[in-house]
Image (spheres, helix red, strand yellow):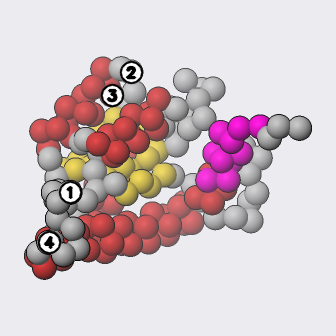
Amino acid sequence: MTDALLAGDTALVTGAANGIGRATAEALAAEGARVVLADLNAEAGEATAAALRQAGHDARFIAADLGAPGGAETLFAAAQAALGRLSILVHCASPRRQESETALEVTAEAWRAMVGVNLEAGFQLGQLAGRHMRDTRAAGPPGASSSSPPCMRKARATCRTTAPARPG
């Protein structure tokens, strides 16, 4: 696993019990990252983490309600306690809603829930992760510029690594 792109990295993925969050957690684990999965759905989240561990990956699950006051801070502290230094944050959590709930149909209550989880919790987690990465000097890949924030070094290196070659 030492040749994996993300070997040595630790990722926190919200909304990781199913859908895009689960697929993201699986992809990060497949590339060697240790993964903290977070979701409101504890049963599905535990099952996802168990499946990743069964496949030989380091995965932990934390039940989290990002719509609750202090939810982002509580999750981030628990993720740090579980795996220490975090170097990747992926925020995929979002309250469930029906696709038929367009802007003309969605209730004010559902809208507030979406804003709370999608925007406010995402903002709070981004701040917590950014400060943590700055303060712990969460390393990017070898050869990345030390003048860039760690998360930006990682993003640039990943894009360079995975981008197709231009035809000559």
Q: Are marks 1 and 4 in contact (CB under 8 Å)?
A: no
Q: Position of residue 98 (x, y in %)?
A: 15, 57
Q: Is residue 52 visible?
A: yes
Q: Position of residue 5 (x, y in %)?
A: 60, 35
Task: Give amino acid for label 1.
Answer: Glu
What secondary structure is marked by label 3?
helix
Q: Position of residue 69 (x, y in %)?
A: 18, 74
Q: How many marks?
A: 4
Q: Quadrant of residue 105?
A: bottom left
As measured in the structure, the alpha-carbon distance from the residue carrying label 1 to the one carrying label 3 is 30 Å
Mark 1 or mark 3, earlier in chain: 3
Tell me which segment is drawn in magenta: 155-165
Residue identifier under label 4: 105
As measured in the structure, the alpha-carbon distance from the residue carrying label 1 to the one carrying label 4 is 10 Å
Q: Is residue 82 visible?
A: no
Task: Give amino acid for label 4.
Answer: Glu
The disc placed on residue 52 is 3
Task: Give amino acid for label 2.
Answer: Gly
Q: Nearer the viewer, mark 1 or mark 3?
A: 1
